[in-house]
C-alpha cells in the first residue's frame, strides 16, 4: 500500500476505524469481514505507526488490546451507579408469585424480561464521550477496584462507542468452558471453575498476561449520565447497547400477558429472543435449566426483570437489591452462610493462610465452620469482606470452599487485607510470589507446625507422642525443632506434670525409640520439604536415589537435570527439593537426626515372588479395618502387586477398598460404577496371590482406629503441601 498521500495522523485514524469495525464484526457480531492475514497486516501497520509517532496513540486504539508489562495496583474507585445484588427465588412458583406481586403493586399491564445469569465477574464500564475511561469491579457495591488496563484486553469490550455518549454499563466478564479447559490443564495449580480463573485474570498485575486469556463479556444494563434512561423499556436499552457496539446475550425471553404483544416489542427493539405469555414462564425456566449444560459458558440461574423503566423508578431499591428484579437460582450442592471473621494461620514453612470463620452451615454431608482462603489474591478475587453472605461448597466432597459472595455486608466492611505483622511472633510479614510468609524460623506457630507434621500419621507416626504432648514440651521451651524429640529427658521434664504418669512417660519413650527404625522414605517425607510428599519420595527411591547422602550431593551440585529426568518429577518439584535441602536450618536438622540414629538409607529391594495381579488397576481406600492398621498397609499390598493407589475417587478409579465408617467416597464410587471391595474379599484376593496371607491373619500394625473421610483427604500425594 502506498502511504505517501496521507499523513501519519490520517493513516492512524483510517486504520483505527477499520480495525474497530473488524474487531466488532468478529468478537461481538460473530461475522468476520476479513481473513486473519489481512487483519494482522493492518494491525501491524498501526503498531508501527504508533511506535514512530507516540503522540498519535490514543487510549481507545485497537492496539491497546495486547496489554502492557507495566504493573497495576488496582486503586479503589467509588461507583456512580447502584451496583447491588439481587433478591433470590428457587422455584418457578416463587418467580410467578413475585410477578403477581409486582403487577398488584402497579395497577397496569407489565412485561418481564428473563435473562441468563452468567457465572462470571461483575464489571462496570464507564464511558465519557463514547470512550472507555474506567472499568471497575463490583467491590462492596459502593467502592470497587479499577482494572481498566486488564479489561481493555478483552476484544468484545468496545474501547470507543459508535456514539459520543456518557454512560455506565454493567456486564459480566466470563471465560468460555472450552478455553477454560484448555488453559486449566496446562496450569501447575488448576482453578476450580471458569469463574475463578476469570476473576484471577482480571486481577493480573500485568495486563500483557491478562491479554493471553480469551475472556468475553455480556452486558445487561445501561445507565446514562443524566440519570434518566432515554428509553421506555429494558429491551430498548439492550437494543441501544447492541447498537453502540456492546455484546448482548441473544438468549433472552420477553413475557407479557399476551404473547403477540411480546413478539411485537422484541421486533421493534430489533432483538432475537423468545416471546411468550406469563403462563409460558414455567416451561421457559425448565427449558433454560435443561439447556444449561450445553451452553458454551456457565450460568448459575436466570434473572427476571420488570421491563418498563418508569415502573422500575417507582419500585426503587432496598439497601442491597432492586425491587424490580429477582434471580431464579439453580439448585446446587452449595449452602449460604455469613463470614463472621477472618483470621490467619502460620504454617510450618511460615506461610500465612487466611481462614474464614463462618456461621456453621450444613453442606455436603457435614457442618462447615472454617474455610481456608489460600492467599490475599484469592480473597481479592472474591472481593470478600467480614459480614458478607457467601456460597460455600465441598470440593471433591471433602474440602470446604467459598465459591462466591452472594450478598455484600451492610456494615460497610471493605475487602479483607492481610496483616502487616505475624500475629504470633510480631515479625514483619514478607511476600514471596502469590503467598505471604512469616520469616522468623523460631516463630512458635512454625515450630508447632514442623513438630506436628513430623510426628503425624503418614510421616513418623510416633506412638503415644501426639500434639498434646508436643504442645506441653513446646510451651516449656524444650521442643524448638524436631531433633529435640530425640534429645529430651522425658522422665525429668514430664515427671510430676499433670496428666503424665510413669506409665504414659514410659510409653512416650518407647514410641520415640521405636520411631528410629522407620524407613528412609518416612524420614524424608517427615522433613517437611514443601510440596514433597510420599509419592515423590517413592519416585526417587524407585529411580535409584536411596540415601540422604545421594540427595545432598545432588543438592550441592544443584543438579536439576538428575531430578527432572525422573518421570513425573517436574522442574518446580525439583527446585523445591534442592532449595529445601540447601537451607542451612534443614542441614542442621538432618545432621542432628542422623546423630540420633534415624535411618537415612533405603535397603535394596528384595526379589518378590508376588505376581502383578493388580497391574493396571487404580485403588482408593476409605474407612477403618481390622487387619490393616494403619490402612496404608492395605495400599502397600496393592502396590506390591503392581496396582496404583490414589487419595480420592475419580472416573479413573477401578477399585475402592471400603471398611467400617466409609463415607462420601463410597457413595461417589457407587455413582461412578467403581468396584467396591470389602475387607474379607480383599484378604481373599491377597490369599489367592500369596497363600501365606490367609483371611483372618492380621497384618502387623496397631490397635484399629476409626478413619474418616477427612483423613482420606490427607493421604499424601505427589506434590503435597501439608
Image (cartoon, rainbow, N blue to C red):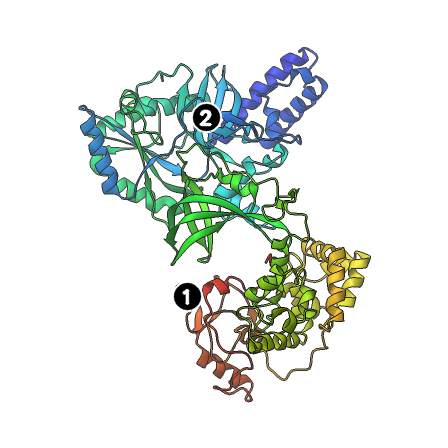
- Disc 1 is placed on an element classified as loop
User: Around disc 1, counting alpha carbons within 10 Å, would you say few (fewer than 14), some (14 to 19), or many (20 or more)?
Assistant: some
State the image coordinates of residue 447 (x, y, percent, origin top left): 64, 57
Residue 157 shows up from this direction = no
**Residue 116 in which image quadrant:** top left
Closest to the observer: 457 or 289? Answer: 457
- Disc 2 is placed on an element classified as loop
Closest to the observer: 694 or 248? Answer: 694
Identify the mark at residue 6; answer none if there is no mark: none
The answer to whether residue 677 is left or right of residue 149 is left
Residue at image point 20% right, 37% down: 279
State the image coordinates of residue 332 (x, y, percent, origin top left): 37, 49
The answer to whether residue 53 is left or right of residue 684 is right
Residue at image point 82% right, 58% down: 557
Residue 433 shows up from this direction = yes
Name, please, the residue furthest toward the front. 496
Q: Is residue 472 above or below residue 374?
A: below
Identify the mark at residue 246; answer none if there is no mark: 2
Identify the mark at residue 663; answer none if there is no mark: 1
Q: Quadrant of the N terminus?
A: top right
Q: Is residue 110 above or below residue 686?
A: above
N-term-proximal mark, 1 vs 2 = 2
Q: Is residue 538 above or below residue 689?
A: above
Residue at image point 62% right, 77% down: 510
Marks 1 and 2: which is nearer the front? 1
**Residue 67 in which image quadrant:** top right
Q: CA distance from mark 1 to mark 2?
A: 49 Å
Q: Total of numbered circles in the picture?
A: 2
State the image coordinates of residue 197 (x, y, percent, origin top left): 53, 42
Amino acid at each position: 500500500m502506498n502511504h505517501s498521500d496521507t499523513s501519519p495522523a490520517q493513516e492512524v485514524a483510517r486504520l483505527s476505524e477499520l480495525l474497530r469495525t473488524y474487531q466488532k464484526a468478529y468478537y461481538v457480531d460473530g461475522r468476520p469481514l476479513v481473513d486473519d492475514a489481512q487483519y494482522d497486516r493492518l494491525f501491524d501497520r498501526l503498531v508501527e505507526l504508533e511506535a514512530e509517532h507516540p503522540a498519535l496513540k490514543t487510549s481507545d486504539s485497537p492496539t491497546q488490546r495486547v496489554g502492557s508489562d507495566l504493573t497495576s495496583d488496582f486503586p479503589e474507585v467509588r461507583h456512580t451507579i447502584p451496583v447491588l445484588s439481587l433478591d433470590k427465588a428457587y422455584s418457578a412458583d416463587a418467580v410467578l408469585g413475585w410477578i403477581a406481586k409486582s403487577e398488584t403493586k402497579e395497577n397496569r399491564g407489565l412485561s418481564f424480561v428473563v435473562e441468563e445469569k452468567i457465572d462470571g465477574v461483575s464489571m462496570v464500564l464507564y464511558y465519557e464521550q463514547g470512550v472507555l475511561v474506567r472499568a471497575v469491579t463490583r467491590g462492596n457495591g459502593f467502592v470497587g477496584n479499577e482494572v481498566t488496563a486488564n479489561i481493555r484486553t478483552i476484544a468484545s469490550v468496545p474501547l470507543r462507542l459508535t456514539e459520543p455518549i456518557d454512560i455506565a454499563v454493567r456486564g459480566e466478564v466470563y471465560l468460555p468452558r472450552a478455553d477454560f479447559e484448555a488453559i486449566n490443564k496446562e496450569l501447575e495449580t488448576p482453578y476450580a471453575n471458569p469463574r475463578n480463573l476469570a476473576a484471577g485474570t482480571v486481577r493480573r498485575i500485568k495486563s500483557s498476561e491478562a491479554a493471553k486469556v480469551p475472556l468475553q463479556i455480556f452486558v445487561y444494563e445501561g445507565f446514562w449520565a443524566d440519570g434518566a434512561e432515554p428509553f421506555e423499556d429494558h429491551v430498548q436499552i439492550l437494543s441501544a447497547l447492541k447498537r453502540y457496539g456492546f455484546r448482548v446475550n441473544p438468549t433472552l425471553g420477553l413475557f407479557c400477558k399476551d404473547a403477540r404483544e411480546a413478539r411485537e416489542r422484541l421486533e421493534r427493539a430489533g432483538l432475537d429472543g423468545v416471546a411468550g405469555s406469563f403462563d409460558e414462564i414455567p416451561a421457559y425456566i425448565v427449558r433454560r435449566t435443561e439447556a444449561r449444560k450445553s451452553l458454551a459458558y456457565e450460568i448459575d440461574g436466570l434473572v427476571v426483570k420488570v421491563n418498563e423503566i418508569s415502573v422500575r423508578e417507582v419500585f426503587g431499591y432496598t439497601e442491597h437489591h432492586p425491587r424490580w428484579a429477582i434471580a431464579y437460582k439453580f439448585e446446587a450442592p452449595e449452602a449460604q452462610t455469613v463470614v463472621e471473621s477472618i483470621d490467619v494461620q502460620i504454617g510450618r514453612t511460615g506461610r500465612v493462610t487466611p481462614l474464614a470463620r463462618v456461621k456453621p452451615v450444613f453442606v455436603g454431608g457435614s457442618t462447615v465452620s472454617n474455610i481456608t482462603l489460600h492467599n490475599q489474591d484469592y480473597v481479592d478475587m472474591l472481593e470478600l469482606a467480614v459480614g458478607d453472605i457467601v456460597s460455600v461448597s465441598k470440593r471433591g466432597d471433602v474440602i470446604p470452599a467459598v465459591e462466591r459472595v452472594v450478598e455484600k455486608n451492610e456494615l460497610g466492611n471493605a475487602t479483607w487485607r492481610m496483616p502487616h505483622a505475624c500475629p504470633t511472633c510480631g515479625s514483619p510479614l514478607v511476600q514471596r510470589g502469590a503467598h505471604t510468609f512469616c520469616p522468623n524460623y523460631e516463630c512458635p506457630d512454625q515450630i508447632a507446625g514442623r513438630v506436628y507434621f513430623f510426628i503425624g500419621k503418614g510421616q513418623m507416626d510416633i506412638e503415644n507422642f501426639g500434639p498434646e504432648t508436643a504442645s506441653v514440651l513446646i510451651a516449656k521451651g524444650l521442643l524448638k525443632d524436631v531433633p529435640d524429640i530425640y534429645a529430651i529427658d522425658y522422665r525429668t521434664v514430664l515427671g510430676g506434670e499433670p496428666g503424665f504418669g510413669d506409665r504414659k512417660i514410659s510409653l512416650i519413650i518407647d514410641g520415640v525409640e521405636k520411631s528410629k527404625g522407620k524407613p528412609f522414605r518416612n524420614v524424608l517425607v517427615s522433613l517437611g520439604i514443601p510440596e514433597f510428599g510420599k509419592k515423590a519420595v517413592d519416585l526417587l527411591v524407585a529411580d535409584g536415589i536411596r540415601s540422604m547422602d545421594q540427595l545432598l550431593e545432588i543438592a550441592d551440585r544443584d543438579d536439576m537435570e538428575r531430578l527432572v529426568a525422573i518421570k513425573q518429577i517436574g522442574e518446580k518439584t525439583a527446585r523445591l527439593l534442592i532449595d529445601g535441602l540447601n537451607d542451612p536450618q534443614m542441614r542442621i536438622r538432618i545432621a542432628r537426626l542422623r546423630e540420633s540414629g534415624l535411618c537415612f538409607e533405603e535397603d535394596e529391594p528384595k526379589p518378590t515372588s508376588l505376581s502383578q495381579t493388580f497391574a493396571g488397576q487404580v485403588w482408593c481406600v476409605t474407612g477403618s479395618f481390622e487387619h490393616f492398621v494403619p490402612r496404608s498397609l492395605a495400599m502397600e499390598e496393592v502396590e506390591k502387586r503392581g496396582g496404583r493407589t490414589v487419595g480420592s475417587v475419580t472416573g479413573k478409579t477401578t477399585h475402592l477398598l471400603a471398611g467400617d465408617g466409609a463415607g462420601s467416597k463410597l457413595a461417589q464410587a457407587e455413582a461412578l460404577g467403581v468396584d467396591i471391595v470389602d475387607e474379607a474379599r480383599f484378604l481373599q484376593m491377597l490369599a489367592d496371590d500369596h497363600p501365606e496371607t490367609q483371611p483372618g491373619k492380621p497384618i502387623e500394625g496397631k490397635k484399629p482406629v476409626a478413619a474418616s473421610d477427612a483423613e482420606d483427604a490427607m493421604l499424601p500425594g505427589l506434590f503435597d503441601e501439608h
